[in-house]
Amino acid sequence: MRKTVVILLHAGYWIMFLLLLTLMLGMLLPAFTEMREPGEHDLSKIAQQWFTLMTGMMIVPGVLSFYVNYFWVFNRTVKPRKWWLMIAAKLCIAIVCGLTGIGVMWLLQIELLHNQDIWGLLFIIFLISFEAFINGIIGLVMRGFIGWFEENKRNEEQQRQNTEMELALIRSQLNPHFLFNTINNIDVLIAKDPVTASAYLNRLSGILRYLLYESPQALTPLDHELKQLDDYIALQRIRSVNPDFIRCTVNGQTAGLRIAPMVLLPFVENAFKYATNKKQSEAVSIQISIHNEVLEFRCSNYFDASHTGESSGGLGNKLIHRRLELLYPGTHQLRITPESGHYVVHLTLTLSRA
């Protein structure tokens, strides 16, 4: 918690404390005026005497108890959970504050102490000690609240840093796989058709720019992600004599929507990597639909049962699952299942608006 906020909390509490004393003065003022002789109803003098009395009985003992508990008792008894020691310490501090209040009242020459017997003096000490005890409790509560808030902020910051580090690690594993496979696609085409290869190199440069400048960002426009998806599919088509082996459809409005970079591409890459029988139409099928802020992504491919597991060269499902958990906690659903000779990925995301 910022120092200015802590100062404002303390100042706010003591302002409320003084307002309470002022309210008490207003309630007791008729009684004070009746106790005085006619002509002695000087309100400023009554108020001065009242706050002089409260300085000895409440303000000095209250401030002393509050801050002794705030700075000393909390760290030595509450943090290590030494509850009996805390209670004993608070009682001792309250009694000391009560005696301190009596000393202040004596120094200020307050009339209340005049002609008091031992029992009257003990009763005044009890009242001052009780008020100091209450202020001590409030000091502990405020110190506990500030400590709880600061600890939560530290935990959130640590969690944020851990999440950023984990996402950076995941990106460092995703991007090399993606680039490796894409460069291999271009390499196949260079020897056969240099002109077409040059056109596809431009697509690759766009993908590289996307990986370098947008992939590290938290969110990117959905249109950008779909553009990279389209470029990657085009690069895959050049490797097959049957360009119809893939079908990709996008339905819905994408304007103003944002998505985490490289969320959809890994699923498509895996579909191409493990798809079998690419001579058949729609060996890989991708369907994307957007309704309001919900994106539904379905990607299926023919598969050979011997290749359904994760391989060292592919993007592991555990890695992808973990990334989605970090990026979209509680706002995504992912199902990966084999269905009638197809390997099907069904992902639902709640997107953000720009």
Image (tube, rainbow, N blue to C red):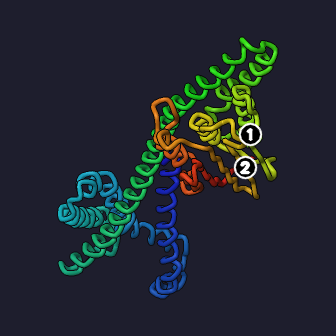
The Cα atoms of the two marked residues, 1 and 2, are separated by 10 Å
Residue at point 22% right, 62% down? 86
Left or right: residue 318 versus residue 233 is left
Residue 260 percent coordinates (x, y): 64, 42
Q: Quadrant of residue 266?
A: top right
Instruction: Evaluate if marks 1 and 2 touch, with contact meaning CB atoms under 8 Å apart.
Output: yes
Left or right: residue 32 versus residue 180 is left
Q: Quadrant of residue 96?
A: bottom left
Residue 265 percent coordinates (x, y): 64, 37
Residue 7 percent coordinates (x, y): 49, 51
**Mark nearer the N terminus (1 vs 2):** 1
Say what amino acid the circle numbered 2 marks: Ile
Dot 1: element: helix
Residue at point 48% right, 77% down? 24
Residue 239 percent coordinates (x, y): 69, 26
The residue singled out by tag 2 in the image is 288
Q: Quadrant of residue 175?
A: top right
Q: Is residue 112 visible?
A: yes
Q: Is residue 99 visible?
A: no
- The answer to whether residue 329 is above or below residue 157 is below
Left or right: residue 255 versus residue 273 is right
Dot 2: element: strand
